[in-house]
């Protein structure tokens, strides 16, 4: 039974049914009974494994094929009419050609299968910033994940109404999970996404990267708002006031961790608290008071499991204790629970590693193997998070005081610095580079440009995207958030991180908030404003972060920075006329300041 009278939805679902030819069509209303039945079915077919229901109530386990464990950037396309509009950082194909190529692959692909029709809202139901999507899929895993990651079910259709055509059409089939025929395709001009031959998160949960970033960034450009790869957090100060900060770091570079940060003892004692609004995506729009407001379009966390433990990210771990789906972690067969590298120092002896082989986990890891895939993930409901913000469902969003950029940089980039203004901040965002991680297929640890952490997610020309940033800055004027850059990943000669990171990142947030309030001075350097000596609070970590270490963390090595300028000139070349003049000016000014 269809859940809507909306003729646009009905017509599209009919077309998709005619194309993929499923045996059965099931409309997902999101009811508890329906979800429970789907869970039971997935467990009975072996698609999902039920974990220990006493220790992990409502939790399920899923393993993807070894060739299908991360996003595939080389197989991800932006298909707009003009190639020029996709820009040099995206793969492009003509939309008609792409559809002509993919249509035969979708033809009859769901024969013998069920097609699930998933209505969902990105953003709180009823929020002026929220948008509706409909995904059709042949995967129960997708339905169960979308149930956690989005506001899924009939309510989304109610929000859409009976006549609107403003919904994103997502077509997914796992098909044969053939990596040679895997395509993740966005058609921004048609509000459409086609995904085939994958069953891994970022490729198939179409509300997430495909819609909430690639399609939404394009919509935001046209409609005057921003869709960004950013966490959103609130810092409650001892006086009760809450300051909201967003931060863009590339995949697997610390967004979830920062979003759920637990302040060090000293800060806790003083009354500081951190609240999570979002851990991956922010939609931001100017509010009636002129300030920039952010909502988290998601309803859950699709977080990196390895490295998550009660010390590094207690709140994330707590979030996974019920109603969570674990993908590609290891199973501890003694008690049917889960394990991953960095959870604790005790790999289970009686383990099943992520590919499904039974191994002695102690010996297996001692020999240098990993029990969990480095990009193994948990899908956890946001409401499980002990520090979820009381504003999480606020349809208005939260007012943003500061925007932070960052990445994994062994050298060059200091722990923290502030831009001179919005335009300079936009330059800093455009200059984000980071060492690659396991979140996408390909080599790990290679330094690459990832402007605004959006390289894999910007749905149009990166030059136009930067122009949009600059326009937003003009609109916001003196109400614009202040822009900062951080680097938690600076290393010593031996490759050890010299900043403790995690909860101690609060010390940097503290400086950032004081800068926003104008209550602390800074050193004006060639690259921006840096903390004055002694202004990053190291109380309690003086042994680790000695004054010498702090000097290294805040060093601006002019030779390295001049190299960085040369590198940026090269990088900017590919954008040609589309590179905003204001950004090339910023680069010139940076060079001048370095040469002074
Ligand atoms: P995506 O979900 O892929 O977008 O990743 P993310 O940006 O949310 O990254 P996440 O917070 O999951 O962190 C990824 C990895 O970085 C984990 O292994 C963390 O342990 C590690 N990490 C996070 N914060 C820090 C930090 O402050 N210092 C260090 N050294 N490592 C960190
Ligand atoms: C990322 O890679 O940035 C993620 C995970 O957040 S995925 O959903 O796969 O994109
Ligand atoms: Mn991400």
Image: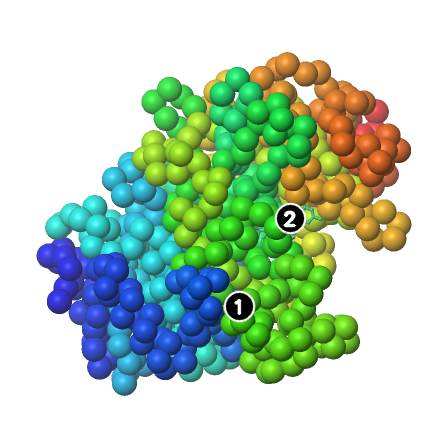
Q: Is residue 14 left or right of residue 437?
A: left
At 15% from the left and 60% from the top, the residue drawn is: 3
Q: Position of residue 584 (x, y in %)?
A: 64, 35
Q: Residue at x 68, y 79 (%)?
A: 360
- Provide the secondary structure element on which disc 1 rests: strand
Q: Residue at x 64, y 48 (%)?
A: 312
Question: Ligand 1 near label 1 (Cβ, under 8 Å)?
Answer: no
Sequence-first disc among 1 and 2:
2
Report if the beta carbon of the residue with label 2 is closer than 8 angstroms to ligand 1. yes
Q: Quadrant of the N terminus?
A: bottom left
Q: Farthest left residue?
A: 5
Q: Give coordinates of residue 86: x percent, y percent.
A: 47, 54
Residue 152 against residue 107 in the figure, above or below: above
Q: Are marks 1 and 2 in contact (CB under 8 Å)?
A: no
Label 1 neighbour load within 10 Å: few <14, some 14-19, many 20+: many
> Which of the two marks, 1 or 2, is nearer to us in this view?
1
The residue indicated by pointer 1 is 337
Q: Which label sits on residue 421?
A: none
Q: Looking at the rendered structure, which numbered label has been put on residue 312?
A: 2
> In which quadrant of the rendered view does residue 286 lie?
top left
Q: Residue at x 35, y 80 (%)?
A: 44
User: Tag 2: Cα neighbours inside 10 Å, few (<14), some, or many (≥20)?
Assistant: some
Whether residue 566 can be seen here: no
Which quarter of the rendered picture does the C terminus lie within? top right
**Can the viewer see residue 257?**
yes
């Amino acid at each position: 039974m269809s859940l809507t009278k909306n003729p646009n939805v009905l017509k599209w679902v009919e077309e998709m049914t005619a194309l993929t030819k499923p045996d059965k069509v099931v409309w997902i209303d999101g009811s508890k009974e329906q979800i429970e039945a789907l869970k039971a079915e997935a467990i009975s077919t072996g698609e999902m494994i039920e974990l220990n229901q006493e220790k992990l109530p409502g939790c399920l386990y899923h393993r993807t094929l070894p060739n299908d464990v991360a996003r595939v950037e080389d197989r991800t396309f932006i298909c707009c009419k003009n190639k020029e509009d996709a820009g040099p950082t995206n793969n492009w194909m003509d939309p008609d050609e792409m559809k002509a190529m993919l249509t035969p692959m979708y033809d009859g692909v769901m024969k013998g299968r069920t097609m699930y029709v998933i209505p969902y809202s990105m953003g709180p139901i009823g929020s002026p910033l929220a948008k509706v999507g409909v995904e059709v899929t042949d995967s129960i895993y997708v339905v169960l994940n979308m149930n956690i990651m989005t506001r899924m079910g009939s309510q989304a259709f109610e929000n859409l109404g009976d006549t609107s055509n403003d919904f994103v059409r997502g077509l997914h089939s796992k098909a044969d999970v053939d990596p040679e025929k895997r395509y993740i395709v966005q058609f921004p001009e048609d509000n459409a996404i086609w995904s085939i031959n994958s069953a891994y998160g970022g490729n198939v949960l179409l509300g997430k990267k495909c819609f909430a970033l690639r399609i939404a960034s394009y919509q935001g450009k046209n409609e005057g708002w921003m869709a960004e790869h950013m966490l959103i957090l609130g810092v409650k100060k001892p006086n009760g006031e809450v300051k909201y900060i967003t931060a863009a770091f590339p995949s697997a570079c610390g967004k979830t961790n920062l979003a759920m940060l637990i302040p060090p003892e000293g800060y806790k004692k003083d009354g500081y608290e951190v609240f999570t609004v979002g851990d991956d995506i922010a939609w931001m729009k100017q509010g009636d008071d002129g300030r920039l407001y952010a909502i988290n379009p998601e309803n859950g966390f699709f977080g990196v499991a390895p490295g998550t433990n009660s010390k590094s990210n207690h709140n994330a771990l707590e979030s996974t204790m019920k109603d969570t789906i674990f993908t590609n972690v290891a199973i501890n067969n003694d008690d049917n629970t889960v394990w991953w590298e960095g959870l604790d120092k005790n790999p289970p002896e009686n383990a099943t590693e992520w590919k499904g082989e039974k191994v002695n986990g102690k010996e297996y890891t001692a020999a240098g193997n990993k029990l969990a895939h480095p990009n193994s993930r948990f899908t956890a409901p946001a409401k499980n998070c002990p520090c979820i913000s009381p504003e999480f469902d606020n349809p208005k969003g939260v007012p943003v005081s500061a925007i932070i950029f960052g990445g994994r940089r062994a050298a060059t980039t200091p722990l923290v610095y502030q831009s001179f203004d919005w335009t300079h901040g936009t330059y800093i965002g455009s200059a984000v580079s980071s060492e690659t991680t396991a979140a996408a297929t390909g080599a790990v640890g290679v330094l690459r440009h990832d402007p605004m952490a959006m390289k894999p997610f910007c749905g149009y020309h990166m030059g136009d995207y930067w122009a949009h940033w600059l326009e937003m800055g003009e609109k916001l004027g003196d109400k614009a958030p202040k822009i900062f850059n951080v680097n938690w990943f600076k290393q010593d000669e031996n490759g050890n991180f010299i900043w403790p990171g995690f909860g101690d990142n609060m010390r940097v947030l503290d400086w950032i908030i004081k800068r926003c309030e104008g209550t602390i001075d800074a050193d004006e350097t060639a690259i921006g404003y840096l903390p004055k000596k002694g202004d990053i609070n190291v109380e309690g970590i003086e042994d680790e972060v000695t004054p010498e270490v702090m000097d290294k963390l805040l060093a601006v090595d002019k030779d390295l920075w001049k190299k960085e300028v040369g590198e940026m000139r090269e990088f900017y070349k590919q954008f040609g006329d589309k590179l905003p003049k204001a950004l090339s000016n910023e680069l010139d000014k940076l060079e001048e300041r370095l040469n002074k």
